[in-house]
Amino acid sequence: MESKVGAILQVRNLSKNFGVTHALKNVNFDIQCGKICGLIGENGSGKSTASSIIAGMQPATSGEMFYKDKPWKPSSVLEASKAGIAMIVQEAGTIPTVSVAENIFIGKYKQFRKGPIVDKNLMYKEAQKALEIIGVTHIDPTFPTHLYDMQDRKLIELARAMYDDPDILIIDETTTALSHYGREILYKIMHRHAERGKAVIIISHDLDEVMEHCDMLIILRDAEIIDVLERKDFNPDDIKFKMIGREIKGSYYRDDFDGYSDEVVLKAERITTMKDLLAFDLELHKGEILGIGGLSDCGMHTLGRALYGLEDIVRGSVKLPGKNNISITSPKVAFNNGLGYVSKDRDTESLDLNASIFANIASTGYKINSKGPFISAKKEKEYVMTQVNNLAIKCQNVFQPVRNLSGGNKQKVVFGKWTAEDADILILDCPTRGVDIGVKAAMYQLIYQMKKAGKSIVMISEELQELCGMSDRLLILKNGKVSGEFMRTEGFDNTKLINCMI
Amino acid sequence: MHSNNFTKMRSMSGLSLSDKFAVIKNNRFVFTALPFFLLLVVIVFFGATTDNFFGATVLTGIFNQAVIFATLAISVSLIYTAGNLDISIGSAMALCSILAANIYISTGSVVLMIISSIALGIVLMSINSTLSTVLNVKAATVGIVMMQIYSAIRETLLGNDAKIVVSYKMSESLESGFRPIAFILFFLLVFIVYTKTPVGRKTRFYGGNANAAIQAGISKVSLQYIGFIICGLGVGLTGIFSLIRTSGVTITTGDGMGMNVMLATVLGGMSIFGGAKSNSYAGLIGALTVAALNKGLLMIGVSAAIVQGVRGLIFLLIIYLSSERQATLPSRQQF
């Protein structure tokens, strides 16, 4: 990791904190000219954070960078792109309502100006050239961008990045949006770029892809660099081990193969919602952890809401076979029949931020803690304190407003209100979102204990690793339909899973 | 406890003056105690500066002045807690007074008079709640419309005379016995419902975050009805209090009452946006403070205009002290 000759970018002791969450901890690495460098690691390991700091999207909390041997502290994407660092982002990076050419030259219309007027024809011609540089001929630069699909839009972004012939090209998890054809174009460009002595950084979840195309790999885990490997040292098992570090973390996820009962406790029968889901079927068994994964717009979040009665179901029904086949028509019915729901949007949906830890946890126990028409202060205190102690919620006292707690502790409060209520079926939508590693481990333990106690859990997540680590059965959704079903007993294969997602 | 306070004070030593103030301001005991403290200050101040502030006539006067606002403010506490408002309560109260006066004049029965007033209060508030749930409109909006309608009915009923007068003797007989007892019972009822039953807790949680409350199986409609029915009970009771105070009803009875109740509630330390910091007694404290302040300032010879000014200043101070600091952590953005 020492400075080497030919390093175009040097990163030294770079850290980034979001509140109490560390996204990067004292990271050091070099980016070499003429090499393709892969940045790999689990979700939340800090890959995107590192690259977005290099590309000027956000500032670092501390540390330094040197670009072409000068201190590098970009204040905006524009500054970075002028200096020769271009990045293709994970999410959509084009404006759908304007033409392809305008997207390619966004922020750079000046060069086409003739007096006060932008010469569109000249711009279209240049855009055509930009597309040809990357070997794309089927896209018409005069057309509005929204006429093109996700893949073509990514290619438009690529054309925009390559037109300036950047010294460093950063590609952030773009390949998941591309088909074989798109990928081939991208790989060709990457290699050509490196051969011409420029640097390429690629962030990817696809191990085969990075092993095939990269000259070196930087492996990140939990915001730290675990290893930097040269091509000759690539070994898939070693890389996987370093990425996930399962052995090191011990029982971070569960490591058993315990099954679950055949008894169906929750059943969705051909449910159709206003958006996302069309005639969707699902069965949840007693003692099962059912993982639901997919790209974020695949419908999995809507599914979670629909199962808890929060989404209007146009057709079909969600039933509880164990409870006289009662239909879940509202959150109230769900709640009264032993369901619990942890929303993806914790702060706006799961907590009253101004209320105390006590009030938030007690909110699920009004019925349980009642004696006749009154609430028993003793019962309620016990109800709350059991959770605060078991979950080790860090606070001065339980009357502290929840809003002052860290993300992890807030999520513990949310978990607490459902474990206190002793819900039989829990629907968890991104339960470890924005939570640090230590709390994550505690949550996984808790989920596993619930399974052991015969509870049934639907775990919706955008993190494939935790789904693989925790699920008994894993459903991958795509466009509101199940595109793959995998069993823990057969082992989860990341490549297969990802193929089902896209 | 002692060591905890000690470390807290020590940790504050590094803070700037404004931060120190914010820490004190946001302390939950300070927040809860402040309205009581203010009332105490008013009482001690006038007790020291006037001769007979603690005399029976003065205290009775303060109670008489405060009781109407206080009862109304206690009635709306659940509605406010849920994050709702209703300013039609003043006009609704006037209608209760009119019905009660007419019943008394035609039957001569005090019991019927009281029952009819309370029944009408409950009916009127149930109408408000029903309109709000059926039309799916915020209760505050319904309240504005209903205030106009109830006022129009009041004017139509009072007709050309513009007032109804009841016997002074009957009024006087109710003032000393019935009124304080009814007031205390009503306050206890609301206090118990608010703090000891699930209704109060649920309403408070709902007012804080409706989404989270719904996900915890709390039903908005039933909570709203309970809140409005309790409010109706208070409105009907206040109809009687108002009737016996002036021995009648006039064309202006109830005017501006909805707004004054709101002011008393805020002065008592409660947010009109509801939620976690709400309680059932804020209106009572606020109404007592205003009444004591009015009486005391008049007793030391301050003119009515200045009384109003002083009231305004105290009001601003309270608003400032009870306002939230918008100190949110930066949200996590990922690229």
Image (cartoon, grey):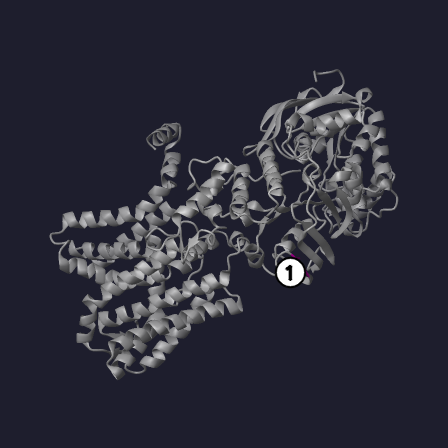
What residue do we see at 43% from left, 47% from top? A380
Query: Tag 1's secondary structure?
Result: loop
* Badge 1 density bin: few <14, some 14–19, many ≥20, Cα 10 Å: few
Residue A208 is covered by the magenta coloring: no
Depth check: give the residue in front, B96 or B123. B123
Q: Does residue B280 appear anywhere in the picture?
A: yes
What residue do we see at 86% from left, 40% from top? A180
Q: Chain of mark 1?
A: A
Residue B304: give x, y in percent of width and height.
22, 59
Seen in the image, is B76 located left or right of residue A256?
Answer: left
In this rendering, the count of numbered labels is 1
Q: Amino acid at mark 1?
A: Asn
How would you classify the magenta stretch by its main secondary structure? Answer: strand
Q: Is residue A235 above or below residue A87?
A: above
Q: Is residue B236 above or below residue A495?
A: below
Residue A171: give x, y in percent of width and height.
75, 34
Seen in the image, is A502 located left or right of residue B151?
Answer: right
Quadrant the C terminus of chain A occupies: top right
Residue B157: give x, y in percent of width and height.
34, 80
Quadrant the N terminus of chain A occupies: top right
What residue do we see at 65% from left, 57% from top? A321
Query: Label 1, on which residue?
Result: A325
Q: Does residue A434 appear anywhere in the picture?
A: no
Q: Is residue A453 above or below residue A198?
A: below
Identify the magenta region: A317-321
